[in-house]
Image: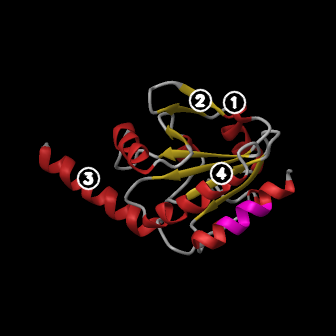
Amino acid sequence: MKFKTFILSICTIAAILFSGCSQESSNQQGASSGSAGVPGQDLSEQSEIIENATFTDLDGNPVTLDQFEGKLVLIDFWESWCGPCLQVFPAMADLREEYPDNFEVLAVTVGLTEGPEEAKAFAAENGYPFTWLYDENGVFDQLGASGIPYKVFISPSGELLEIEMGSRGREGDYNKTEAKIKEYL
């Protein structure tokens, strides 16, 4: 039984590494195309998933998106082993500090290979000004995500704006996100 679990873990890690976590996204798609999540899933289905999403903070409390109404929200699905995920954290922290009343980062640990305890340790060690959450209810899977980083942008009124997989690097993600923030100022 232990050997079977070990093999399954190795296969899962290999699939994750080869399916998503990349420096430049080859699959950057806007939600307006309706094809950023599950094939055949339209924008209204993705919007409904996001609208009803409930995450868990690292102390076990439920968190919903309506708690951040009035701010542009970036849901950033990540794990601590994902280099491209971590590369843009400083840029998103800079934007949080520059636009504290207009922008929120929900750093959501997916649960692929890590749980809330690993995320809590990472958050304590790094001190980024994010809302740290865990995807206990499988929102990542419901959206049909196949790798990280996986980003979901939500308007200040709670509307799904865009879903994308990958990273443009620190400067690219900073510029794109700042443009979205300014659009809603």
- The residue lying at 52 percent from left, 49 percent from top is 128
Q: Is residue 151 above or below residue 167?
A: above
Task: Give the CA distance from mark 4 to mark 2.
Answer: 22 Å
The numbered dot on residue 67 is 1
Task: Give the CA distance from mark 4 to mark 1.
Answer: 19 Å
Q: Is residue 145 above or below residue 59?
A: below
Q: Amino acid at mark 2?
A: Val
Foreground tag (1 vs 3): 1
- The residue lying at 37 percent from left, 62 percent from top is 15
The numbered dot on residue 101 is none
Residue 113 seen in render: yes
Please tell me whether mark 2 sits on a helix, a strand or a loop.
strand
Task: Provide the residue designation for mark 3.
Answer: 8
Task: Provide the residue designation for mark 4.
Answer: 97
Magenta run includes residue 80:
no
Task: Provide the residue designation for mark 2.
Answer: 63
Crowd rating for badge 2 (residues with CA inside 10 Å; few <14, some 14–19, many 20+): some
Foreground tag (4 vs 2): 4
* Highlighted range, magenta: 174-179
Task: Give the CA distance from mark 2 to mark 1.
Answer: 7 Å
Task: Give the CA distance from mark 4 to mark 3.
Answer: 41 Å
Q: Amino acid at mark 4?
A: Glu
The image quarter in which residue 37 lies: bottom right
Crowd rating for badge 4 (residues with CA inside 10 Å; few <14, some 14–19, many 20+): some
Q: Are marks 4 and 1 in contact (CB under 8 Å)?
A: no
- The residue lying at 56 percent from left, 45 percent from top is 130
Residue 32 seen in render: no
Q: Are marks 2 and 1 in contact (CB under 8 Å)?
A: yes
Q: Amino acid at mark 1?
A: Gln
